[in-house]
Amino acid sequence: MSGAVQTVVSSAVTDLDVTELTGADLTYRVASATLLDGVDLHLRTGEVTGVLGPNGSGKSTLLRLIVGALPPSAGVLRLDRADLRQLSRRRRARALALVEQDAHTDIPLTAREVVLLGRIPHQGLFGTDSASDLQLAEQCLHRAGAAELADRDFATLSGGERQRVQLARALAQQPRLLLLDEPTNHLDVAAQLALLDVVQQVAATGTGVLAALHDLNHAAAVCDQVIVLDHGQVVATGHPHEVLTPELIADVYRVQAEWVPTRHGPTLVFAPLG
Amino acid sequence: MTRSTITGTAPPEAGATDPGRTTAAVPRTGRLTPWLVLALVVLAGSAVLALTIGPANITAAEVLGSTRYHVLTWLAEHGLGFLDPGENPLSRIRDAIVWEGRAPRLFTAAAVGAGLALSGAVMQAITRNPLADPYLLGVSSGAALGAVAVLLLGFTLALPLAAFIGALAALGATLALAGIGGRLTPSRTILAGIAVAQGASALVSFAIVASAQGDSYREIINWLLGSVAGASWSSVAIAVGALVLIGTVLLASARTLDAFTFGDTAAASLGVHVTRTRWLLLTITALLVGAMVAVSGSIGFIGLVVPHVVRLLLGARHARLLPVAALVGAVFLLWADTGARTFFAPSEVPVGILTAAIGAPVFAWLLLRTRGQS
């Protein structure tokens, strides 16, 4: 049995052997506004991609579109060559997992039960958790640094603890691509760094990561590429140190920025515009 | 039936780190099967015991003996007579008291209790509203309107059928109203249900004030308060049939309901077609409630309170919550109805009054308890 679990956990093995996700011309409109406008993206497994941009630039919308929680008004998403629309929702949920900002519920569940929600796309009707599901849940809790929280009531956890448990839940989906919506929000500095460390480890095992981030220094530290959104449009794509120029940051965020050398490498510092 | 889910493999360090904040008091691990077996045994025992209660001094042995007699006779009539039915221990009149009077009523009460508890649990999950109850979508008011139409306005239609048609009409109106110009979100659905329920209630009140007299007035009030006093074997067939058919679909959806724990986006990212699933589950749940209301009127508080109590005991996972809540609801309404026909014998109270009298304080206690936690 342990052999079977090993296979399941090894991130290279999945029923979808995916290496990349591409989005072309992704657009999302509501009655009053265009929230995403012709976004192109290219994500590879094993890499961390940051989605940057000010509040309201369309970061969360993009993540929801990719995960299938919102239907795109236009554009195509492909996993390798397969159109995501051709994929059943369950199969899609086995390829893509989302960690939302501030996941909240009134329903009393333990952290372990929350993590087991991630097995739903792998279970059938009358689905129940098998022994390997339970073992996988423990491993995911461990990977997310939340092993000691397993039996705690989710509602009693702190923001950082909840985020780790949700990350464990997303890992239990065994996705090829992990989507994180501002994962460091509301976390103290130590918790932010710990979470980013886990994210990098996840990518190192061959899972692609797409994270909406506010902190540009975090993005520069962990991302292989960044996509900068402004008013729903992509204004730049590429390696963070090449993309995040003072000119672009002034343009998009309306702040002055400067790269300053530090012991930990170049770091951005900010000041109000002129 | 669903098998156990979590097998209690808590890591040793769990709970040791911060005992003050660990909710170890909630026994959510462990097997489901013992709970189901326990609940089934309690239900069966309750049924036999409740059949003995009332005038005519019928014993449990006589109930069991006549059950055996009727089952074996039925089997013999259908060419399966392995065993001799022997003698019915009950005289013809006493047999009728049990099998034409108490039994249909008891089975109807048990099925209605199970159906309402199940519906309440499902409604609470898909609307993510802990206050949701089976009547959320205006189903009971619609059914009342259908019933009033028969009882007061003299439409010649069987009362359960009229109530069921009323329930369906109300459901249709609610979903149409909620779906106009937008997605079927929980809050829109609830608000539409309130609007439809209020409208139908106003019509019911008007019909009563305008035309009810004497017996029909009494009958309609009984029905509005909820009662299974008039249950027959055809009520049993309606209630049990709806429960088995729709209950199976709902049990099969347990994991889908779990997926709604963190809301619509989370459910979608777990592979659930959110809008279609909500539509489907709301509709079939309302059909189940419609069938229950058709045979019993609108019995309150079971659908609201029983899921909360079971959640407290067994946790919130629907694979265990749904079947256990159904059995607890069955036992609860079975005894409530036994009380309703015996407490004030020879007259009786509508069972809906009893369920409200028990349910309201329990609900208040649950409310105070959650406030203490958060």
Image (cartoon, rainbow, N blue to C red):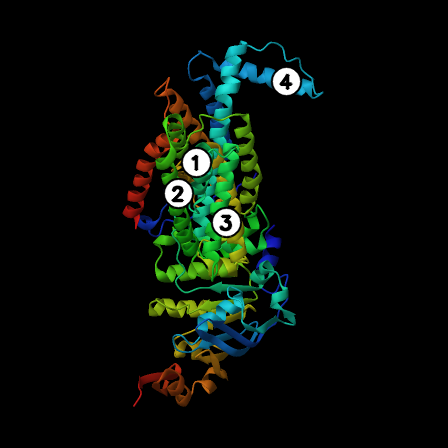
Q: Are marks 1 and 2 in contact (CB under 8 Å)?
A: yes
Residue shown at 49% from the left, 46% from the top: B169
Q: Secondary structure at mark 2?
A: helix
- Mark 2 vs 3, N-terminal side: 3
Q: Residues within 10 Å of mark 4 (few under 14, many from 20)?
A: some
**Viewer-nearest of discs 4 and 1:** 1
Q: Residues within 10 Å of mark 3 (few under 14, many from 20)?
A: some
Quick one: quadrant of the C terminus of chain A? bottom left
Per the image, the residue denoted by label 1 is: B148
Q: Secondary structure at mark 4?
A: helix
Q: What amino acid is found at the position of numbered circle 4 in the picture?
A: Leu
Give the chain of mark 1.
B
Vertical placement of A29 versus B152: above or below?
below
Residue B38 in view here: no
Residue B182 in percent (x, y) is at 47, 62
Give the chain of mark 3.
B
- Mark 1 vs 2, N-terminal side: 1
Q: Secondary structure at mark 1?
A: helix
- Mark 3 vs 4, N-terminal side: 4
Q: What amino acid is found at the position of numbered circle 3 in the picture?
A: Gly
Q: What amino acid is found at the position of numbered circle 2 in the picture?
A: Leu
